[in-house]
Amino acid sequence: MAQFEDAVERLRGWILDGTYQPGAKLGAAEVATALGMSRTPVREAFRILSMEGLIDFSSNRGARVAIWDDRELDSVFETRIALEGTACRLAADRIRVAELHRLEQLGTEILALTEKGPTNQLAEIHTLNGEFHSLIMAVAESETLSTAMSGVVHASILTRTRESYDEHAQRRSAEHHLEIVAALRAGDGRWAEAVMTSHLLAARASLLGPRRTPEP
């Protein structure tokens, strides 16, 4: 692994597990010391994590952990629901056996980590979850979807919502991955799209709360 890739992975993990809180200033020198490397790979890591939506970074103002308000996060969820739901529907007709096997393996590993206690496994769950969602987009083989997704904040910003999940929500989220695999194996695009939509709607509810205030 290249040094800047190691910097990206470790710094992303520290942001996701709350070591660096939203709004925290990230000095290149301080982060480089914490990582045990020079500033050059750290600055490259800042650039990549900025594209993922985890860091606000500019050469003039430096880097800070991104802060997302509720309206911005709601917009992110709506966009991902539309794009990833469509990707699941297309993937059901195009997925190959090896890809199904990999998705099932990823879903199984995510569930196993969740059962261990996901608050201690956020970085690893993030990596597996990112591969799961990215593989579905790749299987969909849609240049239009891929181009649209490139303009959307990285899934890692949604992975941070796991910190707001209760135990039931954590398991439900993990189990959604395996149900998506079952739908893809059945070749049922509408089922796969519906589960992905539920998966992201549940994540939104965990982070942002109910869409309306319940009556007393």
Image (tube, rainbow, N blue to C red):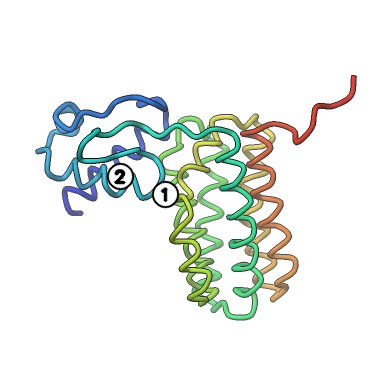
Mark linked to residue 104: none
Mark 1 packing: few (<14 Cα in 10 Å), some, or many (20+)?
some
Disc 2 to disc 1, how far (Cα)? Answer: 9 Å
Q: Quadrant of the C terminus?
A: top right
What residue is drawn where x is 66% and y is 71%? 89
Rendered residue at 34%/38% (across/down): 56
Whole-percent x, y for residue 136 in the image: 53, 66
Camera-side residue of 88 and 24 = 24
Residue 9 numbered mark, or none? 2
Relative to 190, is 158 on the left or the right?
Answer: left
Numbered-mark total: 2
Residue 174 position, x and y percent, is 61, 46
177 relative to 25, above or below: below
Residue 19 at least partly seen? no
Q: Which residue is under mark 1?
A: 127
Where residue 28 sits, quadrant-wise, is top left
Q: Amino acid at mark 1?
A: Thr
Tell me which numbered mark, 2 or 1, is placed earlier along the sequence: 2
x, y percent for residue 43:
19, 42
Dot 2 amino acid type: Glu
Q: Are marks 2 and 1 in contact (CB under 8 Å)?
A: yes
For this orientation, the residue located farthest to the left is: 38
Circle 2: element type: helix
Q: Secondary structure at mark 1?
A: helix
Q: Nearer the viewer, residue 119 or 12?
A: 12
Q: Specify the quadrant that holds the N terminus.
A: bottom left
Q: Residue 103's spot in the image, x, y percent?
A: 53, 63
Is 79 placed above or below 87 here?
A: above
Q: Is residue 199 visible in this depiction of the protein?
A: yes
* Residue visible at 56% across and 62% down in the picture: 104
Please report the residue visible at 41 percent of the width from the left and 44 percent of the height from the top: 53
